[in-house]
Amino acid sequence: MRTPFTLRLFQSMPRGGWIALAIFAAVAWIGVPVAHLALPESHPLHVFAYTVSLLGKILCYMVVAVAMDLIWGYAGILSLGHGLFFALGGYAFGMYLMRQIGRDGSYGAELPDFMVFLDWKELPWYWAGSDSLLWALFLVVALPGLVAFVFGWFAFRSRIKGVYFSIITQALTYAAMLLFFRNETGFGGNNGFTDFKRILGYDITSPGMRVTLFALSAALLIACLVLGRYLVTSRFGRVLAAIRDAESRVMFIGYNPLHYKLFMWTLSAMLCGLAGALYVPQVGIINPSEMSPANSIEIAVWVAVGGRGTLVGAVLGAGIVNLAKSVFTVYLPEYWPFVLGFLFIVVTLYLPDGVVGLWRKLRARRAAAALDDASAAAGAGLSAAIGGAPAEVPATERQAARSTADTPIAKGANA
Amino acid sequence: MFGPTKRQWCIAAVLCVLMALAALPARAALDPALVQGLGGDFNARVAAIDALGVAGGDEAAALLDALEGGRLGTVDGRLVVIAPDGLRDATSGEALAADAGAATRITVNNRLRRAIGTARAALALSSAQPAQRLAAADTLRENASPALLPVLARALAAEQDDAVRAVLRYATAKLELASPDPALRLKAAQALGGSSDAAVKNLLAALLEKRGDGAAATWVEADAEVRAAAAASMRAIDRRIGLAQTAGTLFSGLSLGSILLLAALGLAITYGVMGVINMAHGELLMVGAYATFLVQGAFRSHLPEYLDLYVLAAIPAAFLAAALVGIAMERLVLRHLYGRPLESLLATWGLSLVLIQAARVLFGPQNLELANPSWMSGGVELAGGVVLPYNRIVILGFAAFVLVLIWLMMQKTRLGMFVRAVTQNRPMAGCVGVPTARVDTLAFAIGSGVAGLGGLALSQIANVGPAMGTGYIVDAFMVVVLGGVGQLAGAVWAALGLGIVAKFLEGWAGAVVAKILVLVFIIAFIQKRPQGIFALKGRFADS
């Protein structure tokens, strides 16, 4: 008899995880709103508008990191183009926000300012329906999903993987960035979209809206974590991890990796799109530089810092790196690139499993020191409760990079 | 500008005869009849000035000077020069008894001044300096009057300089096209077909237009035969300009390809040998460019007399600087990440961030512009204003030189053999005694050094700045991916092909769209041939 879905969902996460999520939800949905809205500014527990926006932004980044981890950590596919999906979601929602400005733009025209500036008389066809929130939300998910599906279908069908895949995704986001930089593309060129006024008629700068967006971001993150956790502990997740570790073997058993990879890839892109849509109103701007290869590769470092192959790691990594970035860009902007650069190097050299891996190692060591070697196994059990599937570095990635579909058997299986 | 009237043509005809007379041996003094017009009304004066231009000679020049300086006058209808010491006859130069006050000065207006300038230019056509002749011809091409046709014909016959000849031919044809004689116009329209100048094409195009509106419109050129000849000539010019532009595009494509090749050669080696995507490769270009900048600075302060040779001295400097950085990268970071290509990719990205920021701190964030040595500035001019700059030609040759060196290194030396062996099969190479670790380091050093040379080349045609490498890294990767991993031949074909395709697309669709199309093309290409154009042959088991 099959276990009911709700039960499987509940079982996918250990109790500690649910408790942590509940605490997080309580803070994000009750604690922060109350601290921001109800407490006076002089109160020591008051959360300032800047902080709410910053935290909301980081929550969006965390969603992106989880999406990245799902495809990189669990499927072994390093995407250097996730910034594209994030930005596409942002642009899709940005179109709605631009239409919400109405006649309050600096030209007082029905069209968005940049179109007036370009002397356009009417909206391009792809802006049709952009004044509807529902259509915008549909686009936010569908657009990155469609791009990812088409690209992934071609790429995975040809069994492109490893560094080849990474480089091509980077080229993809680079090409998209160049495209969006053009004024004629119809998305505001260099400047992108900015100067948003309202959502559904409500002022976008009001404290209430700020807190709502923050709570929505938190909700998205929680949903992502639950969904991700469910997926990676399901049979689907196991096949995916198997593909990551030995794709040919999985094929010989009779699975077609294409469907598994493509599903996870598209889902990951959609999650990024949602994160982008929540990010744009909180930051107040979206422009093509979000699609620059540097941004996409930074997403990878968040996951690497936290520890890939664990969802908690992705969240932690995004939080740590972005908080550090916020601090550094305020106090020591000169040194941030150094810190980020060395972070890339140090993490890959010394912390292959990120912060979570370090934590596990320390726990295991302490447990071993405190008890006898017999209790070391218990430590491993504990650590499994924190993260999930152990992150393994596929030893065969190297050969995969060298030559892809070369063996006749593999080709036959593919066909 | 005034179109020549019938009257002026008559004057011109008369003057031609006069000129023939004046050209006879005895040219000691000017013919009084020639200059008599200067005393008449403005039209007569202009005709006389033109005649002076046709006649040429020092006396004519002196007379023009006097006219422009307001030192020419008339006494009883006789043309005189008003000198400080009295009056002199304008043609014979004999002193006159009459008082200076008795002379009526000839006033000069703007129209006359322009005519004088043109006449001066006609005189200057016989100058010994090609630059002066060119300047004179340029003046004439704008304001020559029909009266000057004979001068142009004479100058054209004697002229050796191609640039001057082209301008003179243009000036002549322009005058002839305006002639009332259809035969002359036909001849001119046909002769212009030999030109490759866009300005000439515009001249011809003007003939094929209609004046006026609707049914009342008349052709600018009345004669149908002349129109047909003009159209044919226009087609010939178009063809020639099109050819030159195609050659120019091809050249800039090759030039871009040579830069891509220099950037990709090193990458092909390091990626081939170690399977490591070096995201900091673009920064090795930057290191090479800054090394060139430092060498230039050293030459400027210590050996200013040899400044032109700094580029040559920068070759080893750029190579060594980039190679040293490369060795450090390999030893400190990449060595520990073998077998983990995705992590290497991230680590080298981190290295690139550090290098860019280091350059920003050390040299400042602004772009530096390096001066080309004098022997690298200028260029070869093709038809239709297409110029092939020398610095790009030199870089093309330099890329070929580096390519040959690398090829020799790979094919003829022991190290090259080791590199190829490790590229093909690392474990087997190790088994038969190839010191793979040392080969890795050396290959990385050479690959980085070549990138440094690419930076040197780049510094001669583009700005040097901390982020200069990032713009080329994606393209360089595309070259490597397209050409096939570790394949020199593949890299060459891919680099040149990409360069040329990109430039032709650029002409057709604009730079940004071209870039997007190229990227899309590569993504599509990889679908078909994931191993690039030139795949390694051998038994490579997939994961």
Image (tube, coloured by chain):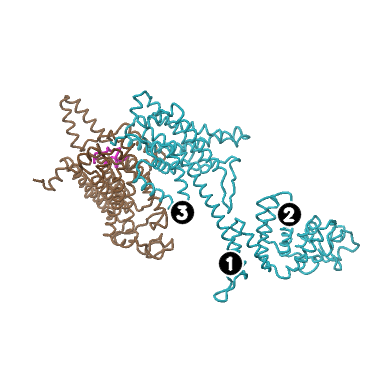
Q: Quadrant of the C terminus of chain A?
A: top left
Nearest to the eye among marks 1 and 3: give it: 1
How far across and down, in percent of the image, does residue A349 sit?
33, 32
Mark 1 or mark 2, whichever is nearer to me: 1
Q: Which residue is mark 3?
A: B510
The residue tagged 1 is: B208
Q: Quadrant of the N terminus of chain A?
A: top left
Q: Which chain is brown?
A: A
The amino acid beneath tag 1 is Leu
The residue that appears at 16% across and 30% down in the rendered structure is: A378
How far apart in space, not on screen, are marks 2 and 3 (Cα)? 44 Å
Residue with the mark numbered 2 = B124
Tell me if residue A186 comes above or below residue B76 in the rendering: above
Range of residues picked out in magenta: A301-319
Q: Is residue B195 above or below residue B316?
A: below
List x then y, in percent, for residue B227.
60, 66
Write down the chain letter for disc 2: B
The residue lying at 40 percent from left, 26 percent from top is B438
The outermost residue toward the bottom is: B215
Local crowd size for mark 2, using a 10 Å CA cut-off: few (<14), some (14–19), many (≥20): many
